[in-house]
Amino acid sequence: MTSELEQELKHLIIDTLELEDVTPEDIDPDEPLFVDGLGLDSIDALELGLALQKRYGIKLDADSDETRHHFRNLRTLAALVEARRTA
Amino acid sequence: MTNDMAHGPLLAAPWREHAPARAVAWQTDAHAEPSWQTLKAFQADIGAWQATLDMHAESPCRWMLSTHDPYRFGCALIAAWERGDHVILPADTRPATLEALDNLGATRLGDLPGGLMASATPRAPRWGQLAPRRVAVSLYTSGSTGEPQRLDKSFAQLDAELGMHAALWPLDARLTLSQVSHQHIYGLLFSVLRPLCERSPFATDVCRYPETLLLWLARWHSQTRREAVLISAPPTLERLPETLDWSTVEGVLARIHSSGAPLPRAAAAHAQRLLGAEVREVYGSSETGGIAWRVQSRDTGWTAFPGVEVRNDDAHRLWLRTPWLSTPDTWTPQADHVTVEGERFRLLGRSDRIAKVGGKRVSLTALERALGELPGVRQAHCTPLPKRDGRLGVIVELAPEAVPHDHDTRRRLTQSLRAALAPRFENAVLPRYWRFVEAWPRDAQGKLGATCLSRLFADLDDPRTPRWLGETLNGPHSARLTLEVPERLAYVEGHFAAQPVVPGVVMVRWALHAARDSLGLHGVCRDMTRIKFPLLLLPGERVTLTLNATHETARNHVEHHVQNDAHGSGMMIELRFTFASQRGTHGTGTLTLTEGAHHA
């Protein structure tokens, strides 16, 4: 089951990264966002980091292991936002 | 070299001479007796254009000129030259192209929306001063290898090249028949300026279709018993139909020219067999002008034009020294690769194209080759999209059975193509924006140029437009467009959360926009009839939009005609549209448009 926040994040990802052939239904919350699953890359990670900062006030170090963990899939990303959001 | 006397340089302005009866252009629509635009009529038409120009701006000023036909083009061009003005030739007539030129302060002339036309009354022309270093025209590169670039050509540069062609291949009073746009350097020189300077007639109109070519050749020959020269390009020559009876015009064509892209050897043989004349191909570019020529039935290697010097470096890059550049004494490197073999050279293709995506270098040539080897893929072209941080877009021509028709199959296809490339290329450089086509998109020059590219990716910048994947024109009033509904289309948002669809009114809007962009119909929609939307149109779906326009005589619509007299015109157009996909018909109907006078 997808939570409201997860649904919101799906839209954020698609809009921020201008993924033209991806709909929210295509994003499996447990599938990796990077490389294999959605096929995102390091530039996307930077873009997504900026978008999270703008929308939720979350600051991330784009290159840290911690960030890599949070960006693993949609669920870990939602958990991060839930825990650290200031906006 | 027999007929040097016939050629006069532009700087000598051969159109000013007192030879009132000399034939400047041949009227293509006269049936029995030949009908000419004489030099006297040509001068009066130049005067009529000057009357219009005088009313709108003082010299010196800038004009952008585009016409369908070579005759009015020649009149308007010389009218502006003789006033001392600067003429810009837009590479195409897309709104974005023209608006960019509006911003340079150029006023629209000819067959452009809001374009000024010649005054209805012939008038004595005014002659001014032409100078060797003065810019005669500014034109634009096709942009097949990047952003279109503006190029200024001086009278001296054009004259140098025109004189060379006149000496090498004199027209000798033959008729010039053009199948190419004179907005580009090849058409400008071969279709308009050469006949004008060599005092040989050219056809008043451009000859788009093979049926017209056959008819005009037969008509020309029966009227004058003289020969003709065809100015053509690969897309037209490759598609000459066997089904027409070309034997009836055997011997009428003295030669055929082709330029824009190399003509496949089989196509050269095909054209020579059907039309009965050699194809003399011209290799060159807007920047460099003509570089070399070949006749493939004799030799597939290229021979440099007289005066042009060619060599290759160790990496096989082509270096040029040519009198038609502004720096005639300097060797300049070109993008093409060649091997020089004695007197001739072979073209090896363009240099490897390197792009940088997210700081990572990628050879586009290698990426395209890798894509081309995948099952179902016929060819591919990658292009960095500057507004998308240089991310790659790709045009992929697929075998018909591999073409995706809905969201799920398209997504599976892009994922499998990306997965197939992933072992050899870094993630960031993999194409992100995929355009799947069944036929390679080409512009009038036979190239996948900037205009095609910008149409293919236009939906990224405007979330209200469908994704354009190609079109075929079937005569001037009928078009078939292949479209895809972008998943991010603004209109599908928030309609029904469970089932996003394209609203019917949006299909009507798309049909109107397509009629404007593909058929040049700028009318206002007055009425809609027989509108039906039998099947929902979904995001990701691939559809064919068929447009058929019927121009009604005003008599059938007296009441509309009266109503529209205020606008100075009352042409009624019935536009029939159909959106159809593999699943069935999504929308169909008839729109009534009134085409008013264009207001700039």
Image (tube, grey):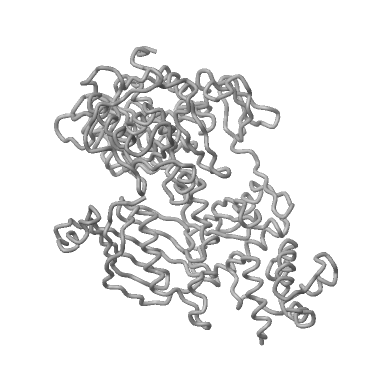
Give how far across and how far down residue B197 sits, in percent: 36, 22
- Is B205 located above or below residue B377 in the figure? above
Which quadrant, please, contains the N terminus of chain B? top left
Give how far across and how far down residue B151 sits, in percent: 52, 34
Closest to the observer, B594 or B279: B594
Closest to the observer, A65 or B93: B93
Q: What residue do we see at 50% from left, 29% from top?
A: B289
Visible residue check, residue B269 = yes
Give how far across and how far down residue B586 sits, in percent: 38, 73
The furthest residue to the bottom: A1
Query: To which quarter of the image does residue B79 belong?
Result: top left
Q: How many marks?
A: 0
- Is B294 located above or below residue B385 in the figure? above
Closest to the observer, B28 or B212: B28
Q: Is residue A24 left or right of residue B555?
A: right
- Is B318 located above or below residue B244 in the figure? above
Q: What residue do we see at 50% from left, 18% from top?
A: B306
Q: What residue do we see at 25% from left, 62% from top?
A: B574
Closest to the observer, B425 or B8: B8
Query: To which quarter of the image does residue B179 belong?
Result: top left
The furthest residue to the right: A65
Q: Is residue B557 left or right of residue B424?
A: left
- Is B541 located above or below residue B339 in the figure? below
Q: Is residue A75 left or right of residue B391?
A: right
Visible residue check, residue B274 = no
Give how far across and how far down residue B339 sits, in percent: 62, 28
